[in-house]
Image (cartoon, helix red, strand yellow):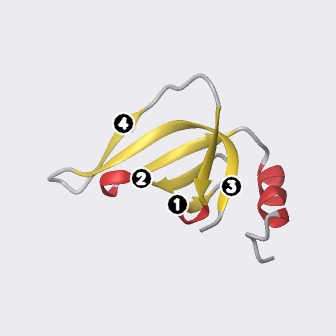
Amino acid sequence: MKFIELEVRTAHIIHGFDDDNKEVIEEVEDSEFFIKIIPIDRILSISNEYLLVSSSHNRVMYWEYNYSMQELTSKLKRAGLIIA
């Protein structure tokens, strides 16, 4: 299993769906970024603003990252994790 070290903070936690099939979203107001070492297979998607990552109990989380998109892409390429 491959891991990567990232500086992130939680922005949103998706807890599933309600009876009307709308996402149940918990807004998180973390003010600080934290260094986390995470398994690569938890990363589901990357946008200019967020990493979408899997979590426990079938939840997903949106993490803000403390890099530019280009810096994050370069970090992943150096680790051999992006095929361009």
Which residue lies most toward the left here? 19
Which percent across, then down, holds residue 12? 45, 40
> Which residue corresponds to mark 2?
55
Toward the top, the furthest residue is 31
Q: Nearer the viewer, residue 20 or 57?
A: 57
Image position of 11 (left or right of 36): left
Disc 2 versus disc 4: nearer the observer:
2
Q: Position of residue 8 (x, y in %)?
A: 63, 39
Q: Mark 3 or 4 closer to N-term? A: 3
- Residue 29 locus on image (x, y percent): 49, 25
Residue linked to disc 3? 4
Indicate which disc, 2 or 4, sits on the residue closer to the N terminus: 4
Disc 4 target residue: 26
In this rendering, which labeled residue sits more in front, label 3 or label 4? 3
Please determine whether, in this image, residue 9 is positioned above or below residue 42: above
36, 22: nearer the viewer: 36
Residue type highlighted by circle 4: Glu
**Mark 3 near mark 4, Cβ–Cβ under 8 Å?**
no
Q: Is residue 26 left or right of residue 70?
A: left
Q: Residue at x 51, y 55 (%)?
A: 53
Using the numbered discs, state the Cα–Cα distance from disc 2 to disc 4 in whole angstroms.
Answer: 14 Å
Q: Is residue 49 left or right of residue 74?
A: left
Q: Which disc, if any, is residue 5?
A: none
